Every structure is written in structure tokens, then in C-alpha cells.
């Protein structure tokens, strides 16, 4: 019971996020386009021949937007940083020719936020909060495996439930095997 209470918010989040991904048509509206937030001239100086990752980290830190992100550099030298944020993802575009920085954000939408929650990764970002998130997810996974295995053990130990339990276990396993083969 206590394990189920501990897992409740995690299972609810994964259930709702999966629902949002499986039924995108229920959430009508235009695709989430980035909206202008602000524009400025960047006065910072990047180290000579700096890698895009170093430049993006410096840029985000100066804008008080430090955190998990991806970065690409276009052929013309323009740096495009996608700042991962569960509620308000941002795209920061730095143009070296005029040192202009354009910051755009995606408007908040529940289904998009749930998808970002579902797809969140932490270990590879190098940021402490993302690592803590990843450790928490690993603990929840371990708890769910324990929950499933303890349920199997309890079913086996309670002789009166063996017949119905076997039907449920066989049915679930057969459906899972069918999808493995069919998909």
C-alpha cells in the first residue's frame, strides 16, 4: 500500500503523458510555434575557436537561462540553442554578424508539457537537477519492478487466487507476446 502511495504521482504522470501522446487528436489546436519573448545585443566575448557547446553554456548563463539544452551551429555561424524546460521551452538564436540574440518561447499547453515530462532525460545533461530527476526515475522503476515481483509472489502464496491469477498472468503475457511479434 505504501509503495503504491509513493508511486501514485509517477504512475499518474506517465499514464496522463502516454494518453496525451496516444491521442494527440483530442488536443486540437495549431502546432506549438515559438513566440518572440525578447531581443538583445550580446556584449559577451566567446573564447577563440570555442565549440558550440561552450558558447551555448556561456550564452545561457549570461541570460539567466542556464540548464539542459541542445545546440547547433548553422553554416553562417549562427548558433541555435534549444533550452529544455518542462513548462516553457525556449529557442535562443545568436547571430555573430550583428551579435543579436533572439529569445523565443513556446506557449504553455498541458499535453505538450506532459510529453516533455515523459521524455525527460537526465544523466547526459551534466546538470544536478536533471541527474536527481534521473535517479528518481530509476528509483521509481526499481519500485515498480519490486511491486510487480511482490505481486507475483503474493499471488503464488495465496492458493485460493492461483486459478484466476494464472488466467490474468497468462492473458497479460499472451497479449504482450502478441504485440512483440506483431509490431
Image: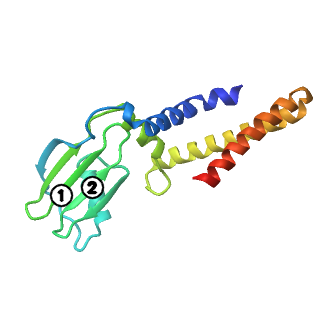
Q: Say which residue appears at 57% left-offset and 47% top-offset.
A: 135
- Of residue 101 and residue 182, the one placed in the foreground of this image is 182
* Residue 3 in the image: above or below residue 99: above
Q: Which mark is residue 1?
A: none
| 85 lies left or right of 179 | left
Do the residues under discs 1 and 2 have CB atoms within 8 angstroms? yes
Residue at image mark 2? 81
* Residue 161 in the image: above or below residue 117: above
Mark before the other along the chain sequence, 1 or 2: 2
Mark 1 residue element: strand
| 153 lies left or right of 13 | right
**Crowding at mark 2 (Cα within 10 Å: few <14, some 14-19, many 20+):** many
| 99 lies left or right of 162 | left
* Residue 51 in the image: above or below residue 64: below
Residue at image mark 1? 94
Q: Position of residue 165 (x, y in %)?
A: 81, 32
Q: Quadrant of residue 54?
A: bottom left
Q: Say which residue appears at 69% left-offset and 49% top-offset.
A: 177
Q: Say which residue appears at 25% left-offset and 37% top-offset.
A: 30
Q: Residue furthest bottom?
A: 49
Q: Position of residue 160 (x, y in %)?
A: 90, 26
Amino acid at each position: 500500500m505504501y509503495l503504491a502511495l509513493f508511486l501514485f504521482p509517477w504512475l499518474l504522470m506517465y499514464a496522463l503523458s502516454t494518453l496525451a501522446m496516444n491521442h494527440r487528436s483530442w488536443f486540437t489546436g495549431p502546432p506549438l510555434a515559438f513566440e518572440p519573448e525578447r531581443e538583445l545585443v550580446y556584449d559577451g566575448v566567446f573564447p577563440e575557436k570555442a565549440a558550440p557547446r561552450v558558447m551555448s553554456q556561456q550564452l545561457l548563463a549570461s541570460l539567466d537561462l542556464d540548464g539542459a539544452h541542445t545546440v547547433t551551429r548553422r553554416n553562417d555561424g549562427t548558433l541555435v540553442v534549444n533550452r529544455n524546460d518542462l513548462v516553457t521551452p525556449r529557442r535562443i538564436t545568436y547571430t555573430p554578424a550583428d551579435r543579436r540574440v533572439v529569445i523565443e518561447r513556446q506557449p504553455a499547453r498541458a499535453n505538450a508539457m506532459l510529453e516533455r515530462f515523459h521524455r525527460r532525460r537526465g544523466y547526459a545533461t551534466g546538470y544536478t537537477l536533471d541527474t536527481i530527476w534521473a535517479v528518481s526515475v530509476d528509483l521509481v522503476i526499481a519500485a515498480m519492478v519490486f511491486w510487480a515481483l511482490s505481486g507475483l509472489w503474493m499471488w503464488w502464496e495465496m492458493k485460493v487466487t492461483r486459478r484466476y491469477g494464472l488466467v490474468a498472468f497468462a492473458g497479460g503475457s499472451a497479449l504482450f507476446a502478441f504485440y512483440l511479434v506483431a509490431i
